Each structure stands twice: as structure tokens, then as C-alpha cells.
Amino acid sequence: MSALVPLLVGIPLIGAAINLIFGRRKKTQIVVSVAALTAVLVLGAILLVEVDTHGPLAVAIAAWDIPFGIVLYVDVLAALLVVVTSIVLLAVLLFSIGQGAADNDEDTPVSIFYPAYLILGAGIFNAFIAGDLFNLYVGFEILLVASYVLITLGGTESRIRTGVVYIVVSLVSSILFLAAIAMVYGALGTVNMVQISERMALLPQDTQTILHLMLLLAFAIKAAVFPLSFWLPDSYPTAPAPVTAVFAGLLTKVGVYAIIRTETQLFVDNDLNFLLMMVALSTMIVGILGAVAQAELKRILSFTLVSHIGYMIFGLAINTPLAVGATIYYIVHHIIVQTTLFLAVGLIERRAGSTSILKVKGLMRAAPLLAVLYFIPAINLGGLPPFSGFIGKYALFDAAAQVGTPVMMVLIVGGIATSILTLYALMRAWNLSFWREDDDSTETMERIAYLGNAPAAAISTERRTIPKIMTLATVGMVAVTVSLTVFAGPLLDMCLRAGVTITDGVSLVQLQEQAGQQ
Amino acid sequence: MTISLVLVIVMAVLFACGVYAMLERSLTRVLIGFLLLGNAANLLLLIVMGVPGKAPFYDGETDAADMSDALPQALTLTAIVITFGISAFLLALIYRSWQLGQADTVIDDADDVALRTRTADEPEDAMDEESRSDDEDVTTDFVGDVASPIRVLHQGDLSQLVDDAPVDRVAVRRPDDEDDTSDTQDGDRP
């Protein structure tokens, strides 16, 4: 079974290589990409069942003795995220195929899209199954370099402008991460995560705090945690719709995943929970206030993305097994719902030729299916029952209430306020774009004049028909968001189990046993 | 573990210079800053290696205590390769940015600026003034300079200068679609 683990990274990389060879044959590229991601999805599902029933898997690459070589480590958290990621990647791939087929690819160098997309996937999977810090760094770099290519796809002026912001910020965080790894190695003589967690207790608290802060800083930039989040709403909205959808769903979550590992595995005794609480609260509030001020759908969504990262950090700051489990559920929910919303907005952009909520109107009558596709994930993200957003937030607040300190209560109130404001921002967009009549009066325009004339909202693209496959991909994703609610029981149980496994931790001996070395 | 003070000082200086250069708006300086930072991080990895000794596989008889720690070397090599690849990408990005705008600066987000001006009538908002004055002295060294070392070619200066890079559909406006485009901007449906 453990032989399957390296394939999670290998298959997308080989797929990318084949795609580069067949750069001029788009059909071959599409078939290879879909096949590679489907294979990873199946593998991920097999591994998820396996690790959920028989416990975590560790694989020593090239049979080097643990902890000297590269270790891949798959527990329920990693396997679950691999499955969710491959579902999202596959759906967005179908969406982009639809878009590409309709646009005839005159103006995007599509031959680079599919390989870069698969490499992005390989990087994400590598980060999830990395058993040592340096391999995690390599995973981050793989996905970041692929994302640099995707965010500047086509090399147009606006994409270069926003790409530069994204790239420079990512570079800084990568260097910080590398420096932090060097410091950890200097202090502990290892980069293996299990060994780090065993040796960490030997260090004085001050040294632990420094290492802890360095790693957190590097990951917080990637996860877009306030006050390190300002790059995100600037850089995401200009990329092509499928790219934005994948970035919004997955890239920040890889940062959050790294923070989970840092908090629950590496620095068990070093307590920065209060700092994390405050950071979580400000991420939620500042992020959502940003969303309320925007008049462009993609920017609104980018700000809600930042704000909802706050919930995940909140869950980690509570630091009980229950809270970690709830955080994992929230991550799964958020990856899927955020991606779906961005796909729905991609459809709106095609249908209406703009994503400005000031300009788009009357869509309810013109495109009723689109209205449903936006509405369901929107109220889901806002946290209305019975959807998964409500379940995830409820689980988080429940875990916080069980701790019951005053600061927890403050955060719960902050979380509820954020949830309501999310609903407000998304429903205002709904009211203006879908519910508003086509021939509305100047009175409405005056009422929304406070939103100003946002330059990004002024960008219009050609209005085009929506190919069936794009709608189909979005419908599929909406179905997945609904299934998160339908299967919330087993899924939440699995997440809570994963939370317990992670907080229990593993020892080096256990790791060697799991790899079959003893 | 004994480490060389000189290396530590060099690393610190590299980090400081790198951070300083990265704070510039000119992308070329950002690139230089990134290179300095990358080298500083690699040097840090080498410093944590400790006292250099013999290569681990040198003759098979070396005592383990006399060997160099090989792991940080492997990490450094990996990091160097990654830094190299990213530098190449950054150079391409800078070139493209130059080709498009005849400038290689980082530009403010238009929506952020709009949001700022929308709230600017409040007297206590000093942020706006401050960032305005910042914007004025940041430019590249070359654009608009009479003594610019490279002749900046604008599109249309030379008939054979063709920008063959792919562009967005928005930028391409054929004269016959003009009606269609203005229609779209009004936001009406056909």
C-alpha cells in the first residue's frame, strides 16, 4: 500500500512532462491531464480508506533509514486533503477545458496551461504528504513556481502588474521559510518533523518561540493571515477565472495546513495561542470589512477568503483535539465552497460581460440556473443552516465554548459577526446582480453610489455564451458542496478522528514501524 | 557547535542589504534583493553545518567526528537550484513588464487607490497624503530620462517592432466590433 504514496506526486509530474512533449496537441493534453488527476483522486481515496482503518502510512524514499532520508507521511488529514484537492483540481480542469474550447485559444498560450496546472497539483500533494520540513519547502516551491506561471498567464499588462505583487510576496515568504529551516536544523540537527517534535522540548522556551514565530510568519504570508494578507485581494482577481478558483480554494489552505503541522506537531509546548487568537480575530473582522467595501465580485470573494482563513486560525488557537478536528472540517468545506463561488463568478463574467455588482443586473430572469449556482454556495459560505458552513462554524464555536474562557467568547462573537457580514456582502451582490430589474431607476443607482466607481469593476469583457461543460463543472461542484452537508456526519467524525490523531502525535519509533523498518 | 563569526556577519549584511533592496519599487532592484536574500539563506544553511571537515565518502576510514555534515550541503544545493530557476523567471517577468509599460516598477492596485480617494475627504485621513508623496519619487531610473542608456522603443516607433506576445481579448479591438464593445461597457444585455 505504501508504494502508492509517491505516485501522488509522481503521476501529475509525469503527466506534466507528457503534456510538454505534446505541447501542440491540445486534445492529448486534455486527456492526459484529466487522466492524471483522476488517477490521483482514485489513489487518494484508496489511501484515505487505508489510513482511516489501519493508521498512518510512512514511506522512506529510496529505503534510507528514517530519519535520515526523505520521509513521506500520510495520515487521515493528509489523505483527506489530497482527495478534496484532486476533486477541486479535476472540476476546475473541466471548467477550463470548457472555457478553452469556447474561446478557441487564440490569445492564451494554452500549451503551458495544462503542464503548469499539473505541476501545481504535484506541489500541493507533495506539501500535504511531506514528512520533513525541507520536503514541505520543496512542495511549496513547486506549487509556487507553477502558480507564478499561471497567475501571469498570457503576460498581459494587468496580469503582470498583479503577478509581480504576488510573486515578490511569495518570494519573501519562501526565503523566510528557508531561513527558518536552517535555524531549526542549527538548533535541533534534524528536519524530520517527528524528530523535531521529540527534540523540541530540549530547547529553552525563548529559542522555541523564535523558531515558532519564524515558521508561523512564513506560513502566515502564504495563508494570507492578517496583517500579512494584503497581497491576496490585489493579485487574485485578475488571473483567468479557473486559475483564481484554484488559487483561492487551495493555495492559502496549503499555508493553513503547514500551520496545523507547526501548531499541533512541532511546537507542542510552546504556547502562542493568545497571539493566534488575536490574529484570527483581526483576520476575520478586517477581511470581511474589506469585502463589504468592494463593488467587484472577484474582489469581494477574495476578501471573504482572507476573512474565513481567520476561522481556521481560530480553531488552531483553541488547540484542543476537538477544535483541530473542527478546523479540518472547516478547511474541507472552505476549499470546496470558495472554489465553487469563484467558478460561479467565472460564469457570471462570461454571461454578463462584467463582474461589477453595479453593472450586472437582471440575471435572475436571464440566467436562472446561474442564479442557483451562485446562491447555494453563497449562503453556504455565509453560514446559514443546514449547509456545511453552518456545521463547520458550529463545530468550531462548540469547541471554543467548551474551553469557555472570556477570550473564547470574544472570538465566538467575532466569528458570528463575520458570518453575518459575509452573508451581507454576498447577498448584496445577489440583490444587485440577480434580483435587480433590468430597467431600474436612478434611485437605486444613487443608493449604491457609495460603492464608488471601482476601477477593477469597470473592466468589461466580451459577453459570451457559456459552454455546457463549464456549467456542468460548476453544477458538479455545487453538488459536492451540498454533499458536504448530506454526509456531514461521517465526514465530521473522520475530521475529529484526524484531529485526535494529530494532537496525539507520533514518535520516531512509531514512524519507523509504519515504514516497516523495524 | 563552533561557527565562524565572519560568516555570520556576512550573512547578516546580506540579509540586511537584500531586505533593503527588496523594498524598492524598481523590479530590477527587487531581483537583486531576492538574489542577496537567497544567498544569505544559503549561507545560513552552511553556517548551521558547523565546522567543515572531510567529505563523508572520502576514503571510508574517516572518523564520523571529522566529517562535514552533508545534509545542509544537500539542502543548500536544492535551495540554490530553486533560487536560480526563480531568478530566471523574474528576469523574464521584468523584461515583459518593461516591454509592456516601458517601466519596471511595482504599480499600486487601482482599486486600492480608488478606495483611498473615496474616503479622502475625512480630515484625519493622513495616509492618503503620505502615500501620494511616496508615489512621486518612485520611478525607474531610465524612463523619461534623456540620458537613458537604452533607447526605449515604444510601440509604433518602428514599423517592424511587433509585440508578438499574446494579449487579452479586451486589448484587441477591431474597428468593426466597436459598437459591440461600447454596448458591453454600458452593461445592457443584447
Image (cartoon, rainbow, N blue to C red):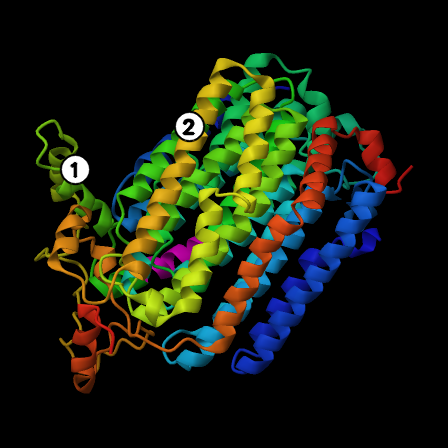
Q: Residues within 10 Å of mark 2 (few under 14, many from 20)?
A: some
Magenta span: predominant SS is: helix
Residue A374 in the image, given as x and y percentages of width and height: 43, 58
Please identify, in this view, whether the residue under mark 2 or under mark 1 is nearer the observer. Answer: 2
User: Which residue corresponds to mark 1?
Assistant: B131
Among all residues in the image, which is located at the extreme right? A518
Q: Nearer the viewer, residue A290 or A395?
A: A395
Above or below, A496 against A205 in this view is below
User: What residue do we see at 56% from left, 24% from top?
Assistant: A400
Residue type for callout 2? Gly
Residue type for callout 1? Ser
Task: Tell me if B16 is positioned left or right of B65 in this view.
Answer: left
Chain ID at mark 1 = B
Instruction: Mark yes or no: residue B26 visible.
Output: yes
Considering the image in quadrants, where does the C terminus of chain A appear? top right
Residue B102 in the image, given as x and y percentages of width and height: 20, 61
> What segment carries the magenta color?
B86-95
User: Which residue corresponds to mark 2?
Assistant: A414
User: What residue do we see at 45% from left, 29% from top?
Assistant: A280
Q: Nearer the viewer, residue A350 or A183?
A: A350
Task: Tell me if A117 is positioned left or right of A288 in this view.
Answer: right
Q: CA distance from mark 2 to mark 1?
A: 31 Å
Residue A180 in the image, given as x and y percentages of width and height: 54, 31
Task: Tell me if B170 is positioned left or right of A328 in this view.
Answer: left
Instruction: Mark yes or no: residue A229 visible.
Output: no
